[in-house]
Image (cartoon, rainbow, N blue to C red):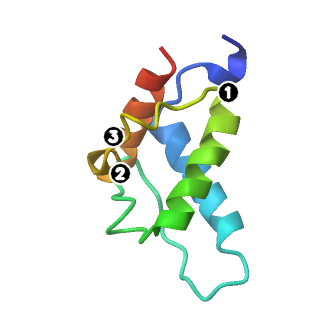
Amino acid sequence: MNEASAQITPEKLSSMIASFLTEMRKGTSVVPVVVTPETNLLDDVGLDSLEITELIYRLEDAAGAKLDLDRLELRHFRRVRDFAEFIDESKR
């Protein structure tokens, strides 16, 4: 496991997601939101299925790990903290 695949904390993931969303939504009329470990990615951020897919690919690259998409469930998007835990578990 390399340094990039070290544990991603909810705080670090919040920052990464905020950065990715800013990039992904550049040039659109979507208003940016503040992303914290308690942010709900579906209700608060309003991610759609394409954004979720792109976010997963970007996070896999950043985390240096392939996520177990067979285990990925809607509940993992309730909070950024839940998604961070899923990513950490997928890397084990």
Can you identify the residue that label 1 sits on? 64
Residue 46 point in image, percent of width and height: 41, 72
- From this view, report whether residue 87 is shown above or below residue 2: below
Near-viewer residue (57 or 32) = 57
Type of amino acid under label 1: Gly
Residue 79 is tagged as none
- From this view, report whether residue 26 is shown above or below residue 69: below
Q: CA distance from mark 3 to mark 1?
A: 19 Å
- From this view, report whether residue 52 is shown above or below residue 29: above
The structure residue drawn at horizontal position 55% and vertical position 83%, both measured from the top left corner, is: 30
Which comes sooner in the sequence, label 2 or label 3?
2
Can you identify the residue that label 3 sits on? 82
Q: Secondary structure under badge 1?
A: loop
Which comes sooner in the sequence, label 3 or label 1?
1
Residue furthest to the front in view is 70
Task: Identify the image quadrant of the N terminus.
Answer: top right
The crowding category of the residue bearing disc 1, from other C-alpha atoms within 10 Å (few below 14, some 14 to 19, many at least 20), is some
Q: Quadrant of residue 84?
A: top left
The structure residue drawn at horizontal position 61% and vertical position 42%, both measured from the top left corner, is: 59
The structure residue drawn at horizontal position 33% and vertical position 50%, both measured from the top left corner, is: 79
Q: Is residue 16 left or right of residue 36?
A: right
